[in-house]
Image (cartoon, rainbow, N blue to C red):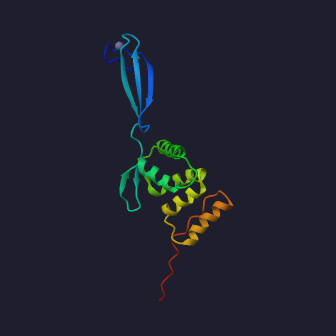
Amino acid sequence: MKCPFCGHTEDRVVDSRVGREGEFIRRRRACLKCHRRYTTYEYIEDVLPHVVKRDGRREPFDRQKLRGSILKSCEKRSVGVQAVDDVVADIEAKLHDRAEKEITSLELGEIVMEHLQKLDQVAYVRFASVYRQFKDISQFMDEVKHLIKDDKPAKPVSAKAPKAAGKR
Ligand SMILES: [Zn+2]
């Protein structure tokens, strides 16, 4: 960093603090030449994707919304807020790694479920039931059964039946 007082490019970090929500790091620096102090802020480049919703609308990734829905899934479970925050951070990190400009709400939901499954099984099923909008109770039971039996992903429900040829 170039010293704002003398222009020297070498400094020493004397203090680092993570911002209120962890969205930045504040560093106090001391110039190695003039010894004056100045502050820099380090932000994550805005690479979090936009979420493409089922109806095609796009909205910016909303950390608070995600955190809220995970907390809700964990209601009355023995999951600490810190654990939830860690999961949110993990998911964000995953989105950063992906480095794509967009993610469908479906894909995002799958990533969340992947993490919740490791965190708390009840929270996972609660989240899944909202997120996948289970069409009926049997689909829901399939999900629960697969939780009990093994950890392989559930079979996708086949969407279309082949159309019957019309009679003449
Ligand atoms: Zn200086």
Q: Which residue lies furthest to the bottom in this view?
A: 168
Q: Which residue lies furthest to the right in this view?
A: 149
Q: How many labels does the image show?
A: 0
Q: Determine whether, in the image, residue 164 is placed left or right of residue 62.
A: right
Residue 69 higher or lower than 160, as above or below:
above
Residue at figure coordinates x 51%, y 56% from the top left: 73
Residue at figure coordinates x 66%, y 61% from the top left: 148
Q: Position of residue 97 (x, y in %)?
A: 49, 42
Residue 88 higher or lower than 132, as above or below:
above
Q: Position of residue 127 (x, y in %)?
A: 52, 58
Q: Which residue lies furthest to the front in this view?
A: 76
In this view of the protein, which residue sits in the foreground, 154 or 35? 35
Q: Position of residue 32 (x, y in %)?
A: 41, 12
Residue at figure coordinates x 35%, y 17% from the top left: 3
User: Taking the image as four quarters, which one is ligand 1 found in?
Assistant: top left
Residue 97 higher or lower than 54, as above or below:
above
Residue 3 higher or lower than 69, as above or below:
above
Q: Position of residue 43 (x, y in %)?
A: 40, 34
Quadrant containing the N terminus is top left
